[in-house]
Amino acid sequence: MEIEKEVKKITLGHEVGAGAACLKCKDKCEGFELHFWRKICRNCKCGIEDHDVQLQTEESQKVGRLFEDTKYTGLIAKLKKDGVPSYRSNQVTISVTAPAIGTAVPIPATAAATVYPAITPTPTAPAATTGPSGTSAPNRGVPSGPAAPSGTSTHNRGVPSGPAALSATSAPNRGVPSGTATPFAASAPTHGVPSGHAATTPAQPSAASPAATVMPAAVPAKTNVVKAITYDWAPPGVNQSLALRYMELLPPEQRPIAGTQGADYRKKQMAKQLPEHDQDPTRCHELSPAEVKQMEQYIRKYKDEALGMGDLTLPEEMVTLAESAGALGPQALEAGAAGDKAAVGKAGMPGAPGAVCSGNYVCHHCQKVMQQGDPAVYAERAGYDKLWHPACFVCCTCKELLVDMIYFFKKGQLYCGRHYGDSEKPRCGGCDELIFSNEYTQAEGQNWHLKHFCCFDCDCVLAGEIYVMENDKPVCEPCYMKNHAVRCAACLKPIEPEAQRVSYGEHHWHADPQCFLCSGCSKCLMGQRFMALQGKLLCSVECKKKVLAS
């Protein structure tokens, strides 16, 4: 009865991404419309991962189901939340501090001053500062002219126009930038201003006054630049510095930075490597009760024996990890207590025969020595004698980076979910599902459900019918003639798939005397020398001149 209920569940999800634009076909696709069993768009034949569909929620649910009810305790411990396996894709924002490009250094007070040209005065009445007797205090450096009446302003040599330079006892201030008020000590000298009186600069200096000499203001040094980088996924359970170093060791085009090529790569690999229909019978098309039972047994097997998630560690910490898991022998424990570093890789398990205690750690994939201090990936299913560079943690079949470090381990090899499934069961070339029935067909180097060996264009069953392989997909003869056949340059009719034809460049002809003939003299050119001119066949230079003249 339970199996019957599973079969009756309908979870096609046609609403997901409906109408989304295709990122490959652009305007040629009318919008995403899920085919009812092919897992592709009905309009453009592209997958959902090729459309602008936001799948974060669906991805989290999919991976959560993948890890649900697993007996792999090391894995479930990382995903448990309130006792229930969950997955949030671990989107993180990491702050990166980068040094400034340049740093400004303040100029000391004794440095040489920059000389600026004199400022042309405007006819503005100067401010006045009156001395003790009420008469004006002369200022050295003021040009001769009409006598300044009592109470007129005192000019202060070397002070540019702007706010007055205030002092407790003196007026002049040499080399102070415009707009800066600078107090002076009591011993500062004054020029022509009685002690105890402040001199105020005029709004504009005289035309004959010398050029002002000023010191540039000190520019504060730039601080380091802090930028935030958001990753759609980062290794869980490790500190940010280790996670950031892991990302730096990946190829730039595969780093899942939000809104970049790397994020698109992760999205496509999530859909390709972990197909939903490999882990949930309700996502498959019309399984029989017997097929549902076989699929459930397959799921139980990979959860118990193969499924895992990679962990980040430092190579020098592998002995500690193995010791805590009880994976080391007595010799290795003694070596660890003595402070030795165990070799990991080709030498084998720490403490195993042939293992050499040294500082060298070897990547299980590329066999190159790993740098201490750089993060390494280990897979608990594979054992503690194996480590991988972050960029080497790939599927042994497709060689693609294992998305979110989710792996399936079988016979000493790492697989992505798709290719692990392919190693266990045949996969249908029509619906992309694993085949759990005993009867299926093989054609064109692929496996097919009996009901799914259909025309890729119109879905008609091809058993016993003529079909043509177009882009590795079977197409019936009517659809081929309508949608894919090339046209004869002579009669302009489509060329049948079984008919012989002659092709030259982008032009094609029926291989018969009625079509493959000279355009000048109508001579049959089958087995003869010819030349082509704008899609026309010619047997000689004379016929060429004749055609050009017409």
Image: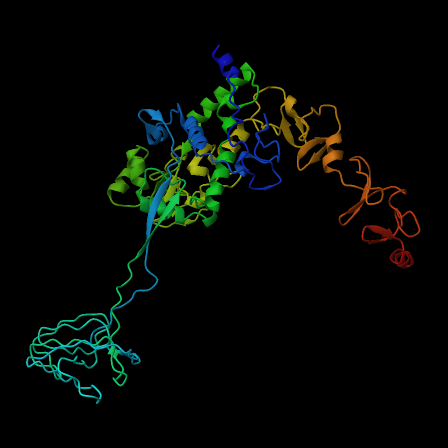
Give the image location of residue 28, x and y in percent.
62, 40
Q: Is residue 224 above or below residue 76?
A: below
Give the image location of residue 523, x and y in percent.
93, 49
Please identify the quadrant where the C terminus is shown: bottom right
Residue at screen point 74% across, 34% down: 482
| Residue 441 appears in the rendering | yes
Please state which of residues 441 and 79 is positioned toward the viewer in this rendering: 79
Please state which of residues 208 and 432 is positioned toward the viewer in this rendering: 208
Q: Is residue 94 above or below residue 472?
A: below
Q: Is residue 3 above or below residue 219?
A: above
Q: Is residue 509 above or below residue 477?
A: below
Give the image location of residue 112, x and y in percent.
25, 79
What residue occupies the far front of the structure in this picture?
149
Please state which of residues 155 and 534 is positioned toward the viewer in this rendering: 155
| Total number of numbered discs in the rendering | 0
- In the image: residue 418, left or right of residue 305: right
What residue occupies the far top of the structure in this picture?
1
What residue occupies the far bottom of the structure in this picture?
144
- In the image: residue 442, left or right of residue 252: right
- In the image: residue 54, left or right of residue 224: right
Give the image location of residue 184, x and y in percent.
12, 74
Residue at screen point 43% across, 49% down: 368
Residue at screen point 21% across, 73% down: 108
Look at the image and name its color scheme: rainbow
Q: Quadrant of residue 312?
A: top left
Q: Quadrant of residue 38?
A: top right
| Residue 332 appears in the rendering | no
Residue at screen point 16% across, 80% down: 152
